[in-house]
Amino acid sequence: ESKELRAGIDAAEQSGKASDLLRVVAGETGTPAPFRALGARLAELADKIGLGYVASRALDGEAATWGGVYFRDTHHMSVGQAKSEFILHEGVHGVTSNILATPKAQLPEAMRAGVQRVEDLLAHVQTQFGMSGIEVPERLKSLLGDGRLGPLANSQEFLAYGMTNTEF
């Protein structure tokens, strides 16, 4: 864990704003430059859409055991570990999940093609990894899991892992 990121979590808990934490990721020296840039852009979008933050200690049930979580119903995110990958992953959920989960017919025309591309790419990758004869490295197998969780579970996870997990 990073002390800078832990301080960012504390700041977000005080303000209730995910953007406060995402800005810390954007300036954190131990975070790779592409992830710092993603943190800066997510912070802007989080401010624009009002993405909230809730302390992980306030969570209960299964969500309390996860490294991070985004709650679509309340539009809040939370992270339990001060790691840029977890923070950015939940931030990506916060700014994209409502779009990806909305039926395409209800989306503005300009968004439909992008959502369809994400869904098409996910379907292609799911098909490729389901085919016999394709050798998958052990590290990737453990990341992919059984398909119910992880990057191939749905378009929201596929996009979040794709943007924040260098092994995926």
Image: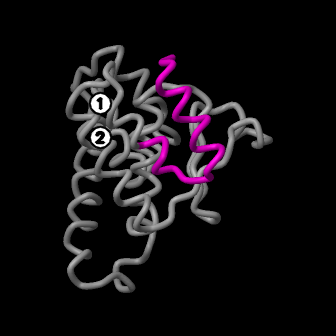
Q: Look at the numbered disc 1 and give the secondary structure of its residue.
A: loop
Q: Is residue 89 above or below residue 28?
A: below
Q: Is residue 59 above or below residue 143?
A: below
Q: Is residue 57 above or below residue 18?
A: above
Q: Position of residue 54 (x, y in %)?
A: 66, 48
- Label pair 2/1, CB-CB below 8 angstroms: yes
What residue do we see at 28% from left, 43% from top?
Answer: 38
Chief SS of the magenta region: helix
Q: Report the span colored magenta.
A: 1-22
- Give the crowd class for mark 1: few <14, some 14-19, many >=20 residues within 10 Å: few
What residue do we see at 63% from left, 65% from top?
Answer: 73
Residue 68 drawn in magenta: no
Residue 7 drawn in magenta: yes
What residue do we see at 47% from left, 33% from top?
Answer: 86
Label whose residue precedes the other's in the sequence (2 or 1): 2
What residue do we see at 40% from left, 30% from top?
Answer: 85
Q: Is residue 61 left or right of residue 25?
A: right
- Give the crowd class for mark 2: few <14, some 14-19, many >=20 residues within 10 Å: some
